[in-house]
Image (cartoon, grey):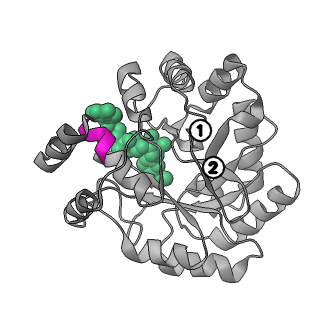
Amino acid sequence: MKTQRLNNGLEMPRLGLGVWQSNNGQEAIYAIHWAFEAGYRHIDTARIYKNEEAVGKAIKQAELPRQDVWLTTKIWNDDIREGRTTAALEESLRRLQTDYVDLILLHWPVDGKAAAWQELERALEQGKVRSIGLSNFMEADIEEIIAAGNVVPAVNQIEYHPYLVQAEAIAASDEHDIAITAWSPLMQGKFLQEPLFAEIAKRYNKTPAQVVLRWCVQNDVIVIPKSVHQSRINENGQLFDFELQESDMVAIDQLERGQRFGPDPHNFDF
Ligand code: NAD
């Protein structure tokens, strides 16, 4: 599996399996099993997905050396607001049946984020996490964390796909060498029939999903596509045996239209 070097020196797999909306039972367990079979070594979950138990079980069942699997989870908004980030991390570790996660993110930039960040810094010192990062943090939120903390975030996970690039958040992340992970990289599957994707896919003998994910990867963005179907998990895993030409990258860039499939981090209420 290809990796990207983070600002803390760790190598993060450039492809992971997203498990939002996978149930906390056989659905997530099978999806993770198929992902490992297809060569994925990175799983992206969160407390709020309510499937950390299944993720933990699937990783145990796989019997891979723990250090070969990159596991990301996230601290939910209520825990950040209530000042219980450390307790929430302990609860996640227990559900995941592991001593540490590779990456923990503050899920959204809610009130209490600076104090929550300092709690994550302590967890890092204690070895309960190998990297700490952000999710849905925009320019001003990133600067607040940099000012409040001693550790620069390793990752910012944001909505990112051909219809939404969030250039300002990426520029603010780049300034601190913070890696970008794309959530909803496939636009939740809703626009893969866009004619440009089909046209490009045909020329490379690939599928529209592979073209979109490859475009992300060539922009140095880590991808965590979600599927619970073995054929799609396999398909989404075949990204490193072809390269899009510059002209195709530029043609996809031109689709940008500021279209979100999730909430706007500048204005959300949950
Ligand atoms: P996605 O863009 O990965 O789309 C997933 C959907 O696309 C699937 O449910 C399926 O309908 C379709 N699909 C998948 N593979 C396909 C293929 N090969 N061909 C055709 N259709 C295909 O959407 P997502 O689940 O929203 O995002 C991925 C992951 O990002 C999540 O599972 C989660 O881990 C993470 N996420 C994080 C946040 C956050 O706030 N940090 C928010 C949303 C999602």
Q: Name the residue under label 2.
A: 12
Question: Which quadrant of the structure image shows residue 141?
Answer: bottom right
Q: Is residue 136 left or right of residue 77?
A: left
Return the x and y of residue 114 as percentages of the image width and height.
67, 73
Circles 2 and 1, Cβ within 8 Å, touching? The answer is: yes
| Amino acid on which the number 2 mark rests in the picture | Met
Return the x and y of residue 264 as percentages of the image width and height.
36, 65
The residue depicted at 37 percent of the width and 46 percent of the height is 213
SS at mark 1 in the image: strand
Magenta stretch: includes residue 228: no
Q: State the residue in front, 69 or 71.
A: 69
Return the x and y of residue 167 as percentages of the image width and height.
37, 73
Residue 202 in view (yes/no): yes
| Amino acid on which the number 1 mark rests in the picture | His
Would the CB of label 1 be found within 8 Å of ligand 1? no
Return the x and y of residue 87 as percentages of the image width and height.
76, 49
Other-residue count near label 1 (Cα within 10 Å), few / some / many at <14 / 14–19 / ≥20: many
Question: Which quadrant of the structure image shows residue 162?
Answer: bottom left
Q: In this view, does 195 lie above or below 80?
A: above
SS at mark 2 in the image: strand
Which image quarter holds the C terminus?
A: bottom left
Q: Name the residue under label 1.
A: 42
The residue depicted at 75 percent of the width and 60 percent of the height is 120
> Which mark is drawn over residue 232?
none
